[in-house]
Image (cartoon, grey):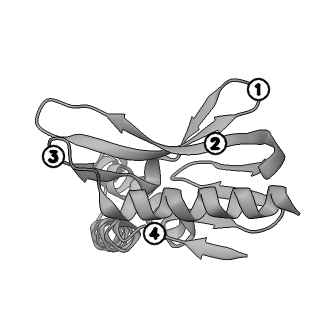
Amino acid sequence: MRKRRPLGAIGYFLMGGACLLIAVVLAMGVRHVVHLLPVVILGVPGVVLTFRAPVFGVRYGPDGLRYSGLLNARSHAWTDIREVRVAVVSGTVYSSDVPELVLASGGTDQLHMLSGHSFGRARNRRVVRLVAELEAARAAALSR
């Protein structure tokens, strides 16, 4: 089973840790219930980011693929995946390259936490490498 994690996961972890630390410091000085609002606003995202960021990424092997995002996780068997490709999500200033699974059922599943930014016609090399690895693993698993 191979694992690939995005480099941004460490940023999410550090940001969550900072929010959690600030929330704890604020909570120590709370005298009234109304002052708990900033603690909740910083504490809840801090907890989610701190404890979810270490498991962001994708794991894949002969059986299939398991993707863990910010709030959810999904699994697909290689037989359920027809193709792995790079999808381009265009924006106003730059676009994002997202690994996309084309499912045998006709739908798609984009792996947003593994996306990368690109400018113009150039594709994000990290995303292209990841898609090539996933497609090679899919082809190898189906040829067995």
Q: CA distance from mark 4 to mark 3?
A: 30 Å
Towards the viewer: 134 or 1: 134
What x and y, as percent, mark residue 59?
Answer: 66, 67
Chain-order first, disc 2 or disc 1: 2
Q: What's the residue at 69%, 23% (across, down)?
A: 106
Q: Residues within 10 Å of mark 4 (few under 14, many from 20)?
A: many
Foreground mark, 2 or 3? 2
Q: Secondary structure at mark 4?
A: helix
Q: Which residue is mark 4?
A: 50
Q: CA distance from mark 1 to mark 3?
A: 32 Å
Q: Quadrant of residue 143?
A: bottom right
124 w.r.t. 20: above or below: above
Chain-order first, disc 4 or disc 3: 4
Q: Amino acid type of disc 2?
A: Glu
108 w.r.t. 70: above or below: above
Q: Which residue is mark 1?
A: 105
Q: Which residue is mark 3?
A: 119
Foreground mark, 2 or 1? 2
Q: Secondary structure at mark 1?
A: loop
Q: What's the residue at 51%, 56% (across, down)?
A: 131
Chain-order first, disc 2 or disc 3: 2
Q: Which residue is mark 2?
A: 83
Towards the viewer: 87 or 24: 87
Q: Amino acid type of disc 4?
A: Thr
